[in-house]
């Protein structure tokens, strides 16, 4: 009996020891997030680069960690989080960006038609056809006017790099944007030695295709599709060996002329006719035919999920329109954003916002300012719900689709990425193991390997979610 009692006594003590160790380990884990982040900051990555880092528990209203959080950095596309938050807060979550079609009888007994734009960044060919459908199929238009009075004629933001010119991520901004001011060109190989088949969307006579490529040429020449951007033309050249289908999306200039050219062509294709194209503000006597409305939530989602620069700039311009002056100048939107941040989060004087997208070399923000903006968004349910639904989800969607898989951060990070040469940033919300929502900002500066930085950032995300 004594041996039996002794056995159960020892077993009981063993389980007590195991429970104690587990309790201590659990408590230590909760206490060592700071230590684990500090350890990550000792990575060799920071021999020749730097980082600013800030983490906030939104449920406990507590700052959990910060490292150089007041340092001004280039945020790259993380700027879009600030732009989206201010736009939703100031314009409202029910705001729409509208494109309108108007008509007016002229003195000669004919008809003039006006298209009034306000930078709808998601306006596509289906939307264009809805404008055409509002006209009689046999319409005879003397003059098709573009009303581009919403903004001035400066189509780029300050500090944008000139050598980004031909690519879709640097658009020529105008009040009338069709497919983001771009055309998608696809080359498909045909018989060996022959020119590949070329498909363009939207199709238009506004641009010219020069096909100099060869199907299965065997020359080892990389296939390229490039606009003659140095010459300022809309000639698109396809060169090299086409061994498989290949697509490139190129911007065109000027965007409003591209819009009007395709609209005129589609009216003609439907049986109507257009005499001339011109520019004029819609007269008060014109009658409204059609309105295409774009919800702000759709624009915010594309800006954050896909890092669409045009969408972010459209939000910025509509913020600038709050001044009530036409045309809206580029600097008005950033000025509204700075005023909002100064009032709402008492931002320090030493920072600068030059554009809405983060393309600019002149935008400098701190991790603390971005963190406070994330807190501000979280404090307004409608704004927060829109932002959260628009942010890429780790391992699942958008620019976070291929990150954190197989880790504790999988499907628990809602964050905006940002990447330009030497800059790699990440900011958004994390779901911690205890169910709390954390706001976090990581601004890596000076590293030439974005992939190395992203792996390090994913380790930070894993710590936050554990």
Image (spheres, helix red, strand yellow):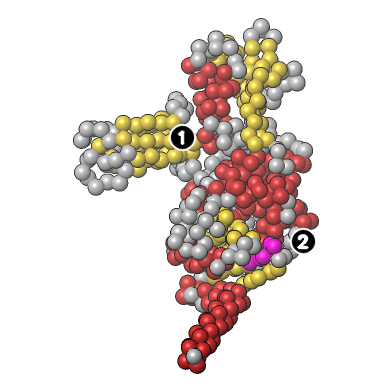
Query: Which callout, 2 or 1, points at the residue further toward the start of the chain?
Result: 1
Q: CA distance from mark 2 to mark 1?
A: 43 Å
> In this figure, which residue is indicated by the disc labeled 2?
346
Count of number-bearing discs: 2
The numbered disc on residue 288 is none
Quadrant where the C terminus sits is bottom right
Q: Nearer the viewer, residue 30 or 61?
A: 30
| Region rendered in magenta | 55-59
Residues packed near mark 2 inside 10 Å, few (<14), some (14 to 19) or many (20 plus): few
The image position of residue 338, as x and y in percent, is 72, 54
**Which residue is painted at 64% across and 60% down in the image?**
437
Q: Residue at x 55, y 58 (%)?
A: 412
Could you tell me if residue 155 is visible in this image? no
* Residue found at x 64% / y 15%: 112
Q: Nearer the viewer, mark 2 or mark 1?
A: 2
- Quarter where residue 28 is shown: bottom right
**Which residue in the structure is indicated by mark 1?**
183
């Amino acid at each position: 009996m004594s041996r039996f009692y002794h056995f159960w006594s020892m077993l009981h003590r063993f389980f007590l020891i195991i429970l104690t160790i587990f309790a201590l380990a659990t408590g230590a884990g909760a206490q060592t997030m700071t230590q684990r982040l500090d350890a990550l900051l000792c990575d060799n990555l920071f021999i020749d680069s730097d980082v600013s880092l800030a983490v906030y528990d939104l449920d406990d209203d507590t700052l959990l960690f910060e490292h150089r959080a007041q340092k001004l950095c280039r945020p790259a596309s993380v700027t879009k989080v600030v732009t989206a938050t201010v736009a939703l807060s100031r314009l409202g979550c029910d705001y729409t960006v509208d494109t309108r079609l108007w008509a007016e009888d002229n003195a000669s007994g004919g008809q003039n038609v006006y298209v009034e734009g306000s930078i709808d960044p998601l306006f596509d060919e289906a939307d264009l056809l809805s404008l055409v459908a509002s006209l009689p199929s046999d319409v005879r238009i003397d003059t098709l006017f573009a009303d581009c009075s919403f903004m001035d004629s400066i189509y780029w933001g300050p500090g944008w790099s000139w050598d980004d010119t031909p690519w879709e991520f640097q658009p020529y901004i105008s009040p009338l944007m069709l497919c983001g001011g771009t055309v998608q060109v696809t080359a498909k190989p045909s018989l060996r030695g022959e020119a590949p088949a070329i498909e363009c969307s939207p199709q238009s006579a506004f641009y010219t295709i020069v096909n100099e490529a060869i199907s299965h040429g065997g020359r080892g020449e990389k296939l390229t599709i490039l606009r003659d951007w140095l010459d300022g033309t809309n000639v698109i050249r396809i060169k090299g060996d086409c061994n498989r289908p290949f697509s490139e999306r190129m911007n065109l200039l000027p965007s409003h002329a591209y819009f009007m050219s395709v609209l005129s062509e589609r009216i003609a294709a439907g049986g109507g006719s257009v005499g001339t194209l011109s520019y004029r503000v819609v007269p008060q006597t014109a009658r409204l035919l059609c309105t295409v409305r774009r919800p702000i939530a759709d624009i915010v989602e594309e800006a954050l999920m896909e890092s669409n620069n045009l969408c972010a700039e459209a939000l910025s311009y509509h913020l600038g329109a709050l001044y009530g002056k036409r045309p809206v100048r580029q600097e008005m939107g950033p000025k509204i954003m700075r005023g909002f941040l100064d009032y709402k989060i008492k931002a320090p004087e030493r920072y600068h916002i030059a554009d809405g997208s983060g393309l600019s070399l002149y935008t400098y923000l701190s991790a603390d300012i971005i963190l406070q903006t994330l807190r501000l968004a979280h404090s307004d349910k409608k704004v927060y719900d829109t932002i959260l639904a628009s942010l890429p989800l780790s391992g699942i969607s958008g620019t976070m689709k291929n990150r954190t898989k197989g880790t504790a951060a999988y499907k628990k990070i809602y964050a905006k990425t940002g990447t330009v040469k030497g800059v790699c940033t990440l900011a958004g919300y994390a779901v911690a193991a205890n169910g709390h929502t954390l706001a976090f900002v990581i601004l890596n500066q000076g590293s030439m390997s974005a992939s190395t930085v992203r792996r390090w950032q994913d380790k930070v995300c894993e710590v936050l979610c554990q």
